[in-house]
Amino acid sequence: MATQLLQNHELFESILEGLPDAIIIADRSQRIVFANRVLTELFSLKRDPVGRDIVEVVLDHRISRLVKQALDSDHAVTEQLKLTVGVNGGSREITLSITAESIDANLIKILLRDDTQRVETEQVRRDFVANASHELRTPLSIINGYIENLLDGAIENEALARRFLGIMKKHGDRIARIVEDMLTISKFESATQDPTRAGVFDLHSCVSDVIERLHPLVEEKEATLQFTPSDKDAFIAGDRFYWDQIFFNLIENALKQNLNPGLRINVLIEDRGDDLQITVSDSGVGIPQSDLPFIFKRFYRVEKHHSKEIKGTGLGLSIVKRAVEAHGGTVSARSVPGQETAFVIVVPKASNDAIASFENASN
Ligand code: ATP
Ligand code: MG
């Protein structure tokens, strides 16, 4: 009998240790009799929680209040709480869904699920929909305004009608651009395939194509654009669709943010053994230090840069970051306004095997 009890005990413990959520079993006085490893990790506990009071371990009175409620009731009590936990000397805010339920007259179990990620993702999604609708509404209402003007008689005056249609076209293009960016983002979110399996291509030819596309804008801005390729091939495993967008946005940003002639833009690709390092830099107005940590966030635009001439949605760099990371790379930015603003991407080179199998497939 004793061995059977012991075996059951071990079985229970191994089941509770295997749970993805933190679990506490406590007695009526809220003293912990069992806690699994997830709890220790979640609260970065240095000491064994067994034998201590719940509140002493989780450092939050709301949890012990919840436990008390469950002890007084005959059903489970659930609540979502935001609390601050210590991590490596610092702290971070987490969202926990906590369920407390009596097991018998003496014991209670408390399940703590870390919902931080889910709650954050939901928030980002909500903000995205709100921001995107706002960004679309402005050009749409401008277009509608001009349509009304045309219907009210402006259409009879050909010169005026042409001017209005020109403005409408510009705002129509903006809507198209925003929708295209949103589609790219949703392509990421629903991506089932790893983009590095899409194929192998040479970044040099990708940069050259983008430079050619942007040539008219470079001329118009009286800027100079210098491209320094690596002395070796620059093959990466990836989806070229994204890399066209990455280079287009980085170079377009440099051109767009800078209204004075004489801007210098440099694109440099360097071979770093296993990686390629790509630097897109410009000599323009730059980005204030206080804005730098935020520029890769969706819809973030530097307040100081807002003007009638400079149009943007603030989606470009968020797409750059997502795309680079999906290819196993990193992107960072540094800026000394007026001197040099640089975006640096480091991405793994395609392996020789990947290059060989790609060449075989295309022969
Ligand atoms: P979109 O790319 O969606 O059309 P955008 O260009 O405004 O809009 P991002 O590409 O995400 O958005 O860039 C975010 C912000 O970072 C820009 O609005 C701009 O203020 C700043 N920024 C980016 N690159 C540069 C640069 N090279 N020089 C100065 N500011 C820059
Ligand atoms: Mg941009």
Image: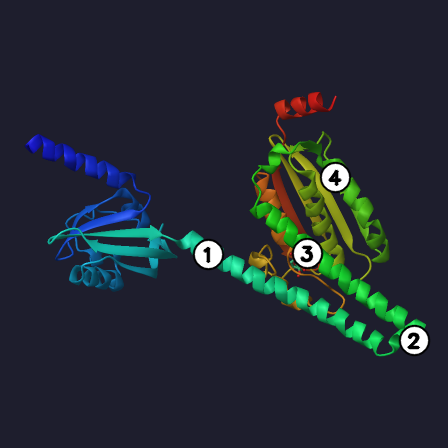
- State which mark lies toward you, 1 or 2: 2
Inter-mark Cα distance, 1 to 2: 53 Å
Left or right: where 138 falls relative to 107: right
Establish whether ligand 1 lies closer than 8 Å to the Cβ of label 3: no
Label 1, residues with CA under 10 Å away: few <14, some 14-19, many ≥20 = few
Q: Which amino acid does label 4 sit on?
A: Cys
**Label 1 sits on residue:** 120
- State which mark lies toward you, 1 or 3: 3
User: In the picture, which quadrant includes the C terminus?
Assistant: top right
Q: Residue furthest bottom?
A: 152
Which callout, 4 or 2, points at the residue further toward the start of the chain? 2
**Label 3 sits on residue:** 179
Indicate which disc residue 156 carries.
Answer: 2
- Can residue 348 be seen here? The reply is no
Which callout, 1 or 4, points at the residue further toward the start of the chain? 1
Q: Relative to 244, is 8 above or below?
A: above
User: In the picture, which quadrant includes the N terminus?
Assistant: top left
Q: Which amino acid does label 3 sit on?
A: Val
